[in-house]
Image (tube, rainbow, N blue to C red):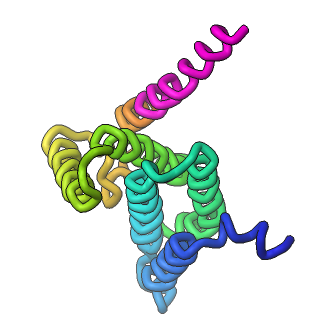
Amino acid sequence: MTGRQRAPLMTTPFALFLAATGVALLAGWPSRTIDGNDAWFLVATVRTAGLAAWAWFAGLQAGNLTNAGERRTLVQLAFAAVVTMPIEMTAHAGSAVTTPMAWSLTYAPLLALSAFVVSRAWTRWLHRAAPAVRWLLSLGLLLVIGALDLRFGPPITLAWVAPSTPNVAAVVVHATVIAVFLVMRLVPRWTRRRDAA
């Protein structure tokens, strides 16, 4: 595989994310076998928060992306989620946790995709605002979402709680956000094809 082919996947955000996930595993793993192993909680938090933050800030840049650029960003996020799966699986296997591994592996990419969709829609809505204003308002939106999540529960977006708290509400909310995004993207295309036929 050539360097040109690797470039879209081996990015700086990916390198930082992979390093942070690996460091979380090493930092959380006990140095003595008699100590309790809680590595998974740290790894799951870092992996979930890292993917979501990357997706959110990528969505803020999406106003400058073409459709190809948007697809490339989603591929990068999916690649990062897959590559870090073994790290989380290792931490899960070595930790005394009752959270199903399927949930912990699924929730992170689900939250990340939902975060990308919301931040992209937010950026398009505020496309006339200055970049600094969009970023400040996006931070305000994150605070509002987090506050609502803390107030009402169960955790849907809180990366330090939701990975260890499986719940149907989180799946429904994120799946709905993603479905709305897909409908809004696909319906205009179908309409144009129908009118062109």
To which quarter of the image does residue 36 belong? bottom left
- For the C terminus, give its image quadrant: top right
Q: Is most of the magenta stretch helix, strand or loop? A: helix
Give the residues in magenta: 176-197
Residue sitting nearer the eye, 11 or 50: 11
The residue depicted at 66 percent of the width and 65 percent of the height is: 9
The residue depicted at 63 percent of the width and 53 percent of the height is: 72
* Placement of 6 over or under 169, stated as above or below: below
To which quarter of the image does residue 14 belong? bottom right
Position of residue 121 in the picture relative to residue 108 (left or right): left
Magenta stretch holds residue 185: yes
* Placement of 102 over or under 6, stated as above or below: above
* Placement of 13 over or under 52, stated as above or below: below
In this view of the protein, can residue 163 be seen by the observer? no
Position of residue 189 in the picture relative to residue 168 (left or right): right
Q: Where in the figure is residue 88, as x and y percent of width and height?
A: 55, 65
Q: Where in the figure is residue 134, as x and y percent of width and height?
A: 25, 53
The residue depicted at 20 percent of the width and 56 percent of the height is: 133
* Placement of 16 over or under 44, stated as above or below: below
Q: Kindly give the residue lying farthest to the bottom in the view shown.
A: 31
- For the N terminus, give its image quadrant: bottom right
In this view of the protein, can residue 133 be seen by the observer? yes
Position of residue 183 in the picture relative to residue 87 (left or right): left
The residue depicted at 26 percent of the width and 40 percent of the height is: 154
Q: Kindly give the residue lying farthest to the right in the view shown.
A: 1
Position of residue 128 in the picture relative to residue 35 (left or right): left
Residue sitting nearer the eye, 81 or 165: 81
To which quarter of the image does residue 27 belong? bottom left
